[in-house]
Image (cartoon, helix red, strand yellow):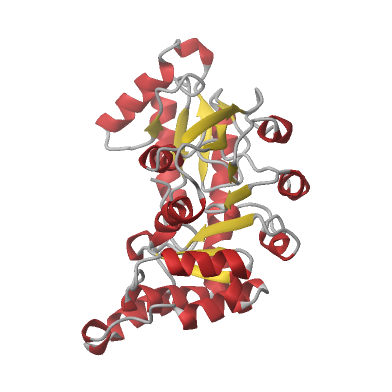
Amino acid sequence: MNENPYPPSPNVLKVLRTTNEEALRLYPDARCDELRAALAKQYGVDKDQTFCGNGSSEIISLIFTVFVESHSRIAIPDPFFSLYHSIASIHQVECVRVPTRDDFSVDVDLLLESGAHVIVLVNPNAPTGRLLPLSEVERLVNHFPGLVIVDEAYIDFAESGLSAIPLIERYKNLVVVRTFSKVYSLCGARVGYCFSNKTLITALEKGKSLYNVNVVSQKLALAALQDQEYMKNTTAAVQRTRDEFCTDLYRLGFDVIPSQTNFILCSPPPQIGDNGAQELYEKLMERNIYVRYFKDTRLFDKLRISNGTKEEMEILYNELHRLLGK
């Protein structure tokens, strides 16, 4: 599931342990004002350009509810994060799969030619791990007349300075969606956030349920955000482990897609056969090692491996080494 292998900040655990009964007895701040102010300060935007939700999944669904008309069309690079297809179906919206290039890089020109009313860009992409350069993201937003949703769930695992957040000052058709689940290790707390211009943020506020983020989750997210040093240290550890494991996979004969996330998409050595990826997936599962296998036309010969700790990745490497007879 691409969860972070490291625990949340010690500050988060301290807040969790010291939360009193009042946090359960009283209603939460419906606007998440304290958390939004902290997010605005951290990312250099105005508080009125921020919005918080019950995980980024709620924000994505809300964007469709508020901005995307039924029987309209969205375009998304393929392969893609399946949640968007599910939400589009619920809202009776056509989902146009725009093929990525052979190396899984996103083709902006094809997206612009898709005839869609809305474009969704998961950047870095899931499940490929590929990142579209910021200059290309801006070209997409600049030349597309409709709404562009940029989902940056994994952006903090990428090289720095590549987020599309600064573009919201120049483009009124952009929403940048983020989450506390991945880099802050708060999947269970369910806190997401997004940035856009004040008009779109106001519309999201009008469309949301009243108390969409509970008191405890707001406090935990705030504590996580305020400990940037811990986040950067654990993120650097994930990046090091990812890069080292990519080298290990190359050594075993895997074909590895360059990743800017906390997971790796790779193809097993060709000599193990056409069903090699599925067979490895099943054999690893028998050993209580869980990776992801997709029965997709472009992914059937690949595995997606979430990054664990260094020790966990060593266990996986040793099992792969043994299964491949290296």
Q: Residue at x 52, y 48 (%)?
A: 262
Q: Quadrant of the N terminus?
A: top left
Query: Horizontal placement of 81 versus 101: left or right?
Result: left
Q: Is residue 198 above or below residue 161?
A: below
Q: Is residue 235 above or below residue 244?
A: below
For the question of whether residue 51 can be seen, the reply is yes
Q: Is residue 89 above or below residue 3?
A: above
Q: Residue at x 48, y 33 (%)?
A: 94
Q: Residue at x 57, y 36 (%)?
A: 75
Q: Nearer the viewer, residue 257 or 212?
A: 212
Could you say where residue 263 lies in the image, as x and y percent from the top left? 50, 43
For the question of whether residue 79 can be seen, the reply is no
Q: Nearer the viewer, residue 221 or 136?
A: 136
Q: Residue at x 40, y 60 (%)?
A: 55
Q: Nearer the viewer, residue 16 or 287?
A: 16
Could you say where residue 223 lies in the image, as x and y percent from the top left? 45, 78
Query: Horizontal placement of 301 versus 129: left or right?
Result: left
Query: Horizontal placement of 281 versus 180: left or right?
Result: left
Task: Place residue 56 in its image quadrant.
Answer: bottom left
Could you say where residue 136 lies in the image, as x and y percent from the top left? 75, 44
Number of numbered labels in the structure image:
0
Query: Horizontal placement of 318 versus 20: left or right?
Result: right
Q: Nearer the viewer, residue 213 or 254?
A: 213
Could you say where residue 239 lies in the image, as x and y percent from the top left? 58, 52
Task: Place residue 160 in its image quadrant.
Answer: bottom right
